[in-house]
Amino acid sequence: MLNGPAAITWLRHRRVSVAVVLVLTIVCIVTLLLAVVGTLAYHYYSDERRQAFADRHILATDQLSFALAPSVWNLEYDQIEQLIYSRLRDPDMFGIVLELDTRKFIVVRDDNGVPRSLASPYSTTQLPAQSRTLTFEGERLGNLTLHASPRQMESEIAHTRLYMVAFALVLDVVLILSLYIVVKHLIIRPLRQVERYADEISSTGDSAMGLGDLRFIGELDGLKHSIDQMVRKLAAHNRELIRINSRFEQVIEQFPLPIRIADDSGQILVLNKHFTSTFGYTKDQLPDMQAWYGHAYPDESYRREALDAWHQAVAEASRRDGRIKAGIFYITCSNGTVRTVDIAGVKFESITIGVLQDITERVRAEEELARYREHLEELVQSRTEELAATYRRLEETQFAMDHAGIAIQWYEAGSGRISYVNDHACRLYGYSREQLLGRTITELAPCLKPDESDIPVANDNAARHARLETTVLRGDGTLLPVEFVIYRQDAEATQSGNFISFASDISQRKEAEQALITARINAEDAAMARSQFLANMSHEIRTPMNAIIGMTQLALQTELEPRQRNFVRKANAAALSLLGIINDILDFSKVESGNLKVEAIDFDLDKVLDDLGSLLGLKAEEKSIELLFDIAPDVPRNIVGDPLRLTQVLINRKRPPNTVFPFA
């Protein structure tokens, strides 16, 4: 049986007779009622049978217990067996167990219904049991257990259930046939005549058959007239729809954009001429959407991407107002060109209208415009950054000028009016900024002229500037020596230009210059006194030294022992060296006067070193110091130079003990 939604779906896809539906509905209701009644009757009957079975089982157990008590008391075992066998002839009984103090009886019915005795207990699973205690005259004799078999009872209940189902089926069949015959003659046949009449009216607008000639029963007669009016209205509406459909087809065909109409099964219903002219595909080439997808999106990966986007847009349109906004796709035309298309449309209940707008040229123009826009934005950004950097530099320059450690002032050419001063200028001149702005430069420094007479003519495009030293009148009335460096700013066509001047406090420099002049004069006087002193002292010292040199030379001409000769020779060399030192002292004055001369004569290096050894040897021996001269092998022995100056240099290179003098 079909449930509600399934039945509705089935009715939509198949033309079902009203009689069949009505009969099936009535039969289902009657069958359901019969099933309910039969189920209740069956349960009542089965409960009654089972209760009667249980009552018979209890009665049989009570009767058997009363019958067996005298026989058990008298120990009449044959009589006991006969009573048990006779009870087991009842088909509802299965087995009896009698437990006495002296004996146990176990008797069951076999499959043929014959009672037989067993030596061991039988299975009592699913067997109803009734137990009694046997007593006689107040004495307990044993236990009696009677097991019943519900097999026959359940069989009877099953047969009864089968009979009831068969009765219900027969009743349903009879009811179905009766209802179908009645409905067919009273409802179906007249409704089919009305249907033929409606078809003729809807197709031709008129019918040879009139509904007035048809005879209906009860409410169907009123329904006949209502259907007649409705059919005629529908026929007129259908004709109007045909006209509207014709106009719609003309609109679709003449629509300036490509249009594609497809049903839910994927069948393409309409392609207008702009679709064919834009993409080159005809209706024969595109019978369904799959063919369109294959031609429009030859690349498989892009086809999957495009289909996913299209299906998602259609699904969203179904959930909302039906308008489809799929987006931009790249469609391959029949000639192999690829066009950029903006696809939109409308989703109705059973069809989908797709509008494909070719935006290839617009996209190209937008891309070109975007490139120009990006280039313009780059230029604007670059210019903005340059302006920002320039503005920052101007701010930094203004900050640097305001806080520079030198006085800066601008004044107009011609009028000499001050237009700008920095903080240092205010401190230097002893005025506030408001006091200085508007003053003329000549009020501060009368020697400055507000024209170009102080600015020399520039050569080779060099900056035109002048450097002047003058005094300015400070705010406290004092005069301050200042050095001005003045630059001329080129004037524009409508302006006279400005002078930019830098002023430095040169009072300390003036004081330093005066101090230097005084110091130079004092130094010249001291140098003259020192030279005079050295000249006098050298004359006084050279007189005894010449005597020592002369006496040692005379001593060397006499016969002396080698040791004495060595001492005298060294004394002579030392005197000569000391005389050279005295000459050096005199050379200081020559250096200061620029008259020192270095000789260039041939001399023996070994002799110079021997004289130096004689001069330093005695002192070295007194201190137990070994005096060594290390001369490189490539140093020549006969050279040109000043031996006295060389000796002075070597003496000035004296070092700590164990010093080696290298010569290279």
Image (tube, rainbow, N blue to C red):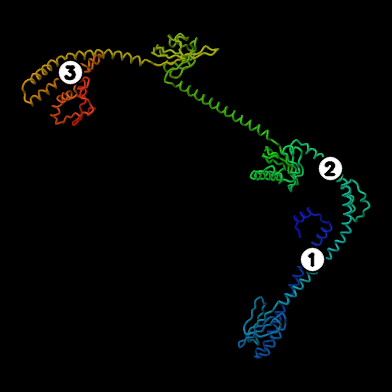
Task: Name the quadrant containing residue 363.
Answer: top right
- Residue 217 vertical position relative to residue 318 in the rendered view, above or below: below
Marker disc for residue 178: none
Residue 98 position, x and y percent, is: 64, 84
Q: CA distance from mark 3 to mark 1?
A: 161 Å
Tell me which label, 3 or 2, sits earlier in the chain.
2
The residue identified by callout 1 is 34
Looking at the rendering, which quadrant does residue 632 occupy? Answer: top left
> Eyeballing the image, is 284 above or below 137?
above
Of the two numbered discs 3 and 2 in the rendering, the one whose residue sits closer to the viewer: 3
Q: Position of residue 653 (x, y in %)?
A: 21, 26
Q: Of tags 3 and 1, which is closer to the observer?
A: 3
Q: Secondary structure at mark 1?
A: helix
The residue where tag 3 is placed is: 582
- Mark 2 = which residue? 242
Kindly tell me whether residue 299 is visible in this rendering.
yes
For the residue marked with disc 1, what is the amino acid? Leu
For marks 3 and 1, the one nearer the N-term is 1
**Local crowd size for mark 1, using a 10 Å CA cut-off: few (<14), some (14–19), many (≥20):** some
Residue type pointed to by label 2: Ile
* Picture quadrant where residue 479 is located: top left
> Looking at the image, do the residues carrying marks 2 and 1 touch, with CB atoms under 8 Å apart?
no
